[in-house]
Image (cartoon, rainbow, N blue to C red):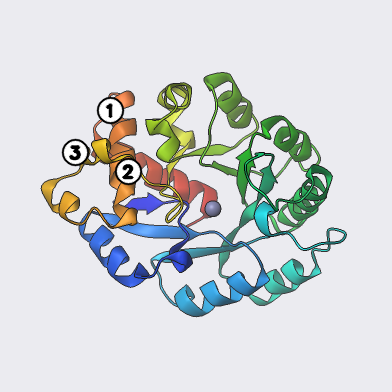
């Protein structure tokens, strides 16, 4: 059983190949590479389309939405021509005020529900980016009740996590579990079969002090952002009083169940 990194922007890493080889030595075997927009879908497909270790997804990320009405034609065309995508995403809403250039809330919402409709039609799980937007995300999901997926890099308390769990979703644990005690608490209590673990490389890094949970071999390569996966898994296993190996196997099963891989 190998580790499954459920959210990793491999195509934004300079040395993806050597980082992946290093991570494989630590038992990480698969990466799910989310889509951000049409040019990126093509580039990721060219770079990783033949790599069995990498799973691809396509979607319009809320940071990179085209202007104008939500027109999903390019996404539909892409999905019709490429059947190697295991999910639709990443899609979602980002209402953080710190990010200049992000589209207006209503524009983001239109694109979000339009893409959910395609996921519903094609029976694809979705990868959701939700920043300060959980209520609106849940509201959007009401329109497509059969769609399930993962809330990537989930941040929030247990009750919020359970609202997604009750809606059929998995939650992706990332760097935030090191910084937000309410989020770590949520991940230590939700059902085990709803947990995924992700690096979100290269955006998120595990704080340095937690690198001590890595084995000496892993620490040597700790400039490798893909190894943050092992530190995150170890932190979560500790919070759930589980052996990391059994949590790794559980996470792998969860990914297989959601993405059919
Ligand atoms: Zn992402």
Q: Which mark is residue 249?
A: 2
x, y (%) of residue 254? Answer: 45, 43
Q: Is residue 13 left or right of residue 88?
A: left
**Residue, x 69% and y 73% (percent of image)?**
78
- Residue 210 against residue 119 in the figure, above or below: above
Pick whichever, 225 or 235, lies toward us.
225
* Of marks 2 and 1, the one in the foreground: 1
* Residue 176, visible in the rendered structure: yes
Q: Residue furthest left?
A: 216
Classify 10 Å Cα crowding around label 2: few (below 14), some (14-19), many (20 and above).
some
Q: Assess mark 3: CB under 8 A from ligand 1?
A: no
Residue 179 % position (x, y): 41, 30
- The spot of residue 5 in percent (x, y) is 40, 52
Name the one closer to the observer, 205 or 84. 205
- Where disc 1 sits, the SS reads helix
Circle on res. 172? none
Identify which residue is drawn at 45% across, 77% down.
Answer: 50
Residue 142 horizontal/vertical position (percent): 78, 36
Q: Earlier in the sequence, mark 2 or mark 1?
A: 1
* Residue 167 lies in quadrant: top right
Q: Residue at x 48, y 63 (%)?
A: 55
Against 191, residue 227 (above or below) is below
Asked whether, in this view, residue 106 is left or right of residue 222, the answer is right
State how far apart marks 3 and 2 are (Cα). Answer: 22 Å
Q: State which tag comes first along the sequence, 3 or 1.
A: 3
Determine which residue is flagged by label 3. Answer: 212
Instruction: Write down the residue under mark 1.
Output: 238
Quadrant housing residue 31: bottom left
Q: Are marks 2 and 1 in contact (CB under 8 Å)?
A: no
Residue in the image at 76% along x and 51% along y: 103
Q: Does residue 61 appear in the picture of this structure?
A: no
């Amino acid at each position: 059983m190998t580790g499954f990194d459920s959210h990793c922007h491999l195509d934004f890493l300079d040395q993806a190949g050597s980082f992946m080889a290093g991570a494989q030595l630590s038992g990480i075997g698969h990466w799910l590479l989310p889509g951000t927009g049409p040019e990126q879908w093509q580039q990721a497909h060219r770079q990783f389309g033949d790599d069995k270790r990498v799973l691809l997804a396509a979607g319009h990320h809320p940071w990179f939405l085209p202007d104008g009405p939500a027109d999903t034609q390019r996404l539909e065309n892409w999905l019709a021509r490429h059947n190697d995508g295991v999910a639709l995403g990443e899609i979602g809403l980002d209402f953080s005020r710190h990010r200049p250039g992000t589209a207006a809330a209503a524009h983001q919402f239109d694109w979000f529900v339009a893409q959910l409709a395609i996921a519903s039609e094609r029976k694809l799980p979705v990868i959701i980016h939700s920043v300060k937007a959980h209520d609106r995300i849940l509201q959007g999901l009401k329109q497509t009740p059969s769609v399930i997926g993962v809330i990537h890099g989930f941040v929030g308390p247990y009750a919020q996590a359970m609202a997604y769990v009750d809606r059929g979703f998995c939650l992706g644990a990332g760097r935030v579990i090191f910084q937000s005690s309410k989020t770590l608490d949520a991940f230590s209590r939700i059902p085990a079969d709803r947990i995924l673990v992700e690096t979100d490389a290269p955006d998120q890094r595990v704080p340095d002090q937690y690198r001590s949970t890595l084995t000496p071999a892993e620490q040597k390569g700790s400039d490798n952002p893909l190894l943050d996966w092992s530190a995150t898994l170890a932190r979560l296993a500790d919070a759930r009083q589980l052996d990391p190996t059994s949590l790794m196997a559980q996470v792998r099963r969860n990914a297989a169940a959601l993405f059919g891989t």
